[in-house]
């Protein structure tokens, strides 16, 4: 059994769909491994339900329906689901409930600050990030009201970490701030320190509190990896590439 992971989808705004179609995955991994995939996790900014993009969503669903596994999304920052109060929650047997977006193909969002058991892997699911592109709009505001974590979410997460601090993997949108700076210092020059991302700072705190085998995130629109040898922990940033978790193996 296996779990597929991919980076930002943006409702296919920049042809991200081409990398996760059935044909693309079979071509990359082979049919046998494709048939082992039980879940697909998008690491934030999936972009489903974007206002005015109903035709785009319909096309994406049609293509994604050719694959037999459900899609579970980490909450990003460009995420219309954050502004919706009308979406149902569902229990699909992975621990916590998910926020249901679509039935066929099955598309749902994982909640921030929750622990999920997906295909045998114990995941800590985080999410969110600063929308740095607000710089290019007229008002310095978030895209959605709940873009940042609420105090209640933070308190619930810290209570969880007091009870449980050992996980197989962490799933988030942006990475820990200290890792972001190591990998993207050059990119951050145009945004730092003006665009201070408190979500990344929160991820630093979490990173220090837990043990895990690795961390997966998106947000930075690039594919990079950093290995912290002292912690024996690898931070995997995905965008153009995908990865498959199978047992203790990461297949890219």
Image: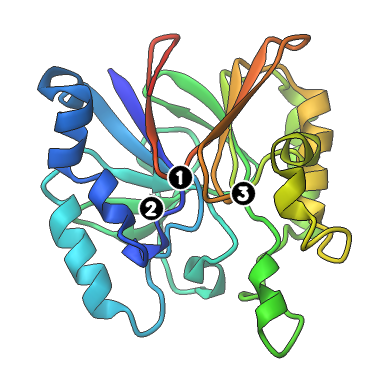
Check residue 173 in the rendering and tell me which mark sits there, or answer none.
none
Give the mark, 1 or 2, whose residue is nearer the N terminus. Answer: 2
Q: Going by the image, does 192 lie left or right of 134?
A: right
Q: Going by the image, does 196 lie left or right of 165?
A: right
Q: Which residue is mark 1?
A: 239
Which of the two discs, 1 and 2, sits closer to the camera? 1
Give the mark, 2 or 3, whose residue is nearer the N terminus. Answer: 2
Separation (CA) of disc 2 from disc 3:
14 Å
Residue 184: percent from the left, percent from the top?
70, 43
Which of the two discs, 3 and 1, sits closer to the camera? 1
SS under mark 3: loop
Check residue 127 in the rendering and tell me which mark sits there, or answer none.
3
Residue 136: percent from the left, percent from the top?
66, 80
SS under mark 2: strand
Counting other residues with Cα less than 10 Å from the Cα at mark 2, is it few (<14), some (14-19), or many (20 or more)? many
Separation (CA) of disc 1 from disc 2:
20 Å
- Tell which of 166 and 208 is nearer to you: 208
- Tell which of 155 and 38 is nearer to you: 38
Which of the two discs, 2 and 3, sits closer to the camera? 3
Whether 3 is drawn above or below 187: the answer is above
Specify the farthest residue to the bottom: 138
Separation (CA) of disc 3 from disc 1:
16 Å
User: Is disc 1 in contact with disc 2, using a CB cutoff of under 8 Å?
Assistant: no
Q: Which residue is mark 2?
A: 108
The residue at 77%/44% (across/down) is 185
Residue 157: percent from the left, percent from the top?
74, 41
- Quadrant of the drawing holding the N terminus: top left
The residue at 22%/38% (across/down) is 69
Whether 106 is drawn above or below 175: the answer is below
Whether 58 is drawn above or below 230: the answer is below
């Amino acid at each position: 059994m296996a779990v597929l992971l991919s980076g930002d989808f943006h409702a296919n705004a920049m042809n991200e769909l081409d990398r996760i179609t059935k044909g693309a995955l079979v071509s990359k991994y082979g049919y046998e491994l494709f048939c082992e995939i039980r879940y697909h996790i998008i690491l934030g900014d999936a972009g489903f339900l974007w206002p005015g993009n109903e035709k785009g969503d319909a096309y994406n669903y049609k293509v994604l329906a050719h694959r037999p596994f459900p899609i579970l999304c980490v909450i990003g920052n460009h995420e219309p689901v954050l502004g919706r109060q009308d979406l149902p929650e569902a229990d699909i047997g992975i621990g916590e409930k998910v926020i249901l977006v679509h039935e066929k193909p099955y598309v749902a969002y994982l909640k921030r600050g929750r622990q999920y058991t997906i295909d045998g892997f114990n995941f800590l699911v985080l999410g969110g990030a600063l929308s740095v592109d607000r710089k290019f709009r007229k008002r310095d505001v978030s895209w959605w009201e709940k873009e940042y974590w609420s105090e209640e979410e933070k308190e619930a997460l810290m209570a969880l970490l007091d009870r449980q601090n050992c996980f197989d993997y962490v799933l988030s949108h942006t990475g820990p701030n200290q890792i972001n700076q190591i990998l993207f210092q050059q990119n951050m020059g145009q945004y730092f320190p003006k665009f201070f991302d408190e979500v990344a700072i929160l991820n630093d705190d979490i990173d220090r509190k837990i043990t895990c085998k690795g961390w997966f995130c998106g947000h930075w629109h690039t594919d990079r990896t950093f290995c912290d040898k002292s912690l024996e922990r690898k931070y995997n940033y995905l965008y153009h590439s995908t990865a498959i978790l199978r047992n203790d193996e990461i297949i890219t």
